Amino acid sequence: MAHRRLANLLQQLLLRDDVAIYRQLLIVLLLCLGLGLIFIGSNQSTPQSKIQTTENCGVEETVVNLQTPVQIAEVIVESGITRTAPNDEATRLTPLPKGTKATVTSIKGDWLRLGYGAWIHRQEMQTLVSNTYPQALVCDISYRKLKDRTEVIFPLGTPVPISVKQSDRIFTLTLHNTTAKNNIVTINNDPIISRIFWQQEKARKVKYTLNLKNTQQWGYKLKYEENKLILTLRHSPFTPTFTPVSGFRGPLSGIKIVLDPGHGGMDSGAKSPEGYLEKDVNLIVTKLLREQLELRGAVVYLTREDDVELSLADRVARINTIEPAIALSIHYNHANTVKSGKQVQGVGTYWYHPQAVGMAKFLQKYMVQNLGRPSDGVRWKNLALARPTIAPSVLLELGYLSHPEELQWIIDPYEQQNLAMVLADGIVEWFSSTR
Ligand SMILES: [Zn+2]
């Protein structure tokens, strides 16, 4: 119909003996061209894999120049430790990557309270004065599949504070001081992510939920590159792209494992009444365990080989650099307390992130069953060597030096060898249970 009307109009115009006819003809021609383009456009389907975006992607949202400048703080360390209250004992929140910026709403001693509610030590921040709030508008998020990991990239106008939560088959990332404008992120054949969706929880708080294909999560990291937040999720060491390091054969073929013998040097750790030092037993047992894991094909790294002092931060840094499949910290315990008339004994396993709880429970059960030792339980505890996020990490307390009978088991070379074998078998079994 539109075409016929246009033809009529064109005919009428052509019949008119008017000087303006050429101008009108030009208008009609332009109209036709416009209609044609709309027609072509409507026939093209919107590609599903493309994230729909709006204007101002990745730029700071409407910059309001404030009358009174506000105090802004920026994280200057690799990972800023955030807490629920202004003291070192308060619960930890998700650490903030270097470069994160937020407004400072109050100051208490050496602690700064950031706009989204967390407290952070002044030492880890530099303060600036700004006449705009650090707020981001996120859209056009993308993801890329790499050989052994998937990266989700969030272009932001400014590096905003974040929070992470892991649960069964779910990874959630909350961006504070952020408004989201993107629609759907279609995931094609990713080994770990099945779906990503988002929810604007509050005016300036957006939650991204990543539905995962498997129960076991293999570690993650978050960092800012300029104003882009990069979330890295590691694939299972058994994904098809996994290529074992040649020369290592066995059920753990080519799997990287970090073992951390606790304490060392001036720091002896626990001490038995007879003078046996935890640092020494830790190192002996860790080396025996390395031998057993290597026999099963693993590529094992130790945080220390000798009786040297090593800070917790250095141990964690080693784990972050090596990026193993798992990390285990080896310790022995000590207790002065007596529980219902008996001295405390048994093996215990400690975890912090949900991605390590499966391994913690499995190894604990396996050790207790196969060593015939009492169980001191699987516990959630905020320990530095359970905190790395790059890989499932647990801390093992393999017995109490303070318990006279358990001490005999702890220091017996035959039992130490047996413990290393049982633990290595447990690790093999756990890995195969995650496949
Ligand atoms: Zn210890």
Image (tube, helix red, strand yellow):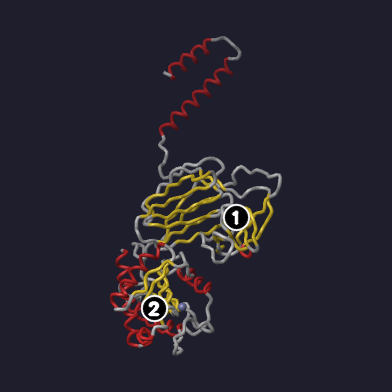
Residue at x 37% of width, y 80% of height: 342
Q: Quadrant of the C terminus?
A: bottom left
Quickly name the residue at label 2.
344
Q: Position of residue 34 (x, y in %)?
A: 50, 27
Give the structural element (helix, strand or loop) at label 2.
loop
Residue 184: x, y in percent? 43, 44
Report whether the residue tagged 2 is closer than 8 Å to ligand 1.
no
How far across and down, in percent of the image, does residue 434 sit? 32, 64
* Distance in Å between CA atoms under marks 2 and 1: 43 Å
Question: Going by the image, does 379 lie left or right of 141?
Answer: left
Q: Residues within 10 Å of mark 2 (few under 14, many from 20)?
A: many
Residue type at mark 2 is Val
At mark 1, the secondary structure is strand
Q: Nearer the viewer, mark 2 or mark 1?
A: 2
Disc 1 target residue? 114
Q: Quadrant of residue 76?
A: bottom right
Q: Quadrant of the N terminus?
A: top left
Of all residues, the one furthest to the front in this rendering is 341
Q: Residue at x 67, y 53 (%)?
A: 71
